[in-house]
Image (cartoon, rainbow, N blue to C red):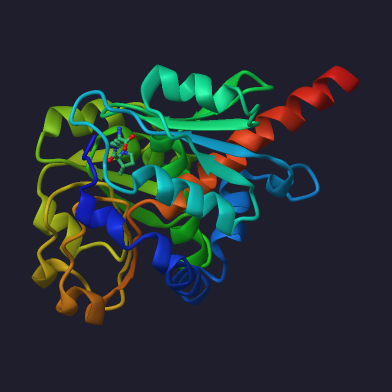
Amino acid sequence: MTRLTDDDVKGISDSLQDVNDMLTETTGMSLIELAYEAVNVTTAGTDVTEFTVGVVPVTSGMGVITRFSESVADICRSMGMESFVTKTYDIKGLAEALSQSPDIVFMADDYEFIAYNTKARRHANNSQCTAAGYVTALNGAAKGLIGKTVLVLGAGRVGGWAAGLLSAKGANVILADIDIAKAEAVASRFAGAVATDRIGEAIASNDLIINSSPAHVESRYIREGAIISSPGVPHTFDEEAYRKATIIHDPLSIGVAVMAVMSSSFYIQDIKKCRR
Ligand code: 2YC
């Protein structure tokens, strides 16, 4: 998984309103509306403002990313969720968080980023939630995906989840990766999905794109009027790309917002099961 840098994260807390405005303009949904749509629940079923959040910084691997945990907490606060970041790290930090009985605990190392619902004892993961958020954004911006062809750049975890969600939405999926074997392995899981390693050609012949790759996308391949829903980091689109296409990106907010709604939704589903 590509790792955010301090630089990617430093502006997040101050740009939450900009993200909301960008999403409203490009998809017709605010961040929280997008997150509910992505998890396919309504506020009637799950009201995230009733859930509290604890975020625990983790020092393993390449260590803490400056303001990563604070940004996660700010994103949840912007959705009306009472949130805190622990003063201590790792297991000590988890113990500190649990002593305050949060409904959801967010933690990330260099391999997994989860939102654990302490009551439902289930967690949401960032890869699935990021894919769900960006597929939902593309669906909104394209005004539906049924029968349309969508190019997925990058056959990693987010790309794999996105291919599955797009397939479920009735889109025709093309999976592009420089590693054709990787693209074919993922494409083979979804009826009708095809794999390619001819990246430039694929970009030049598709108007709807999910970019879940860390690679640079050459603006010269991008079609006028294309819609690129782009979770990929580093985010390296230039002004020519932004002139030609509608590009939907933010480094963390969409994934975290969907994680918060998905993790909250586990609790309600379990309660309903008990009531039957
Ligand atoms: O500050 C901390 O607690 C660090 N351990 C956080 C490391 C996050 C590493 N993961 C990522 O940077 C990417 C993000 C795009 C979101 C998911 N993985």
Which is nearer the eye, 129 or 190? 129
Q: Position of residue 108 (x, y in %)?
A: 36, 31
- The structure residue drawn at horizontal position 59% and vertical position 34%, both measured from the top left corner, is 263
Q: Position of residue 91 (x, y in %)?
A: 41, 17
Which is nearer the eye, 98 or 7? 98
The quarter of the image holding the N terminus is: top left
The quadrant of the picture showing ligand 1 is top left
Q: Position of residue 35 (x, y in %)?
A: 57, 51
Number of marks in the image?
0
227 lies above or below 112: below
- The structure residue drawn at horizontal position 40% and vertical position 29%, both measured from the top left corner, is 88
Judge from the rendering whether residue 91 lies leftward or rightward of residue 6; answer left or right: right
Which is nearer the eye, 56 or 149? 56
Residue 264, by quadrant, is top right
Q: Position of residue 123 (x, y in %)?
A: 54, 25
Judge from the rendering whether residue 47 lies leftward or rightward of residue 188; answer left or right: right
The quarter of the image holding the C terminus is: top right
Residue furthest to the right in view is 276
Q: Would residue 272 be visible to someone looking at this image?
A: yes
Q: Would residue 276 be visible to someone looking at this image?
A: no
- The structure residue drawn at horizontal position 59% and vertical position 21%, both measured from the top left corner, is 122
- The structure residue drawn at horizontal position 24% and vertical position 25%, both measured from the top left corner, is 185
230 lies above or below 260: below
Residue 79, by quadrant, is bottom right
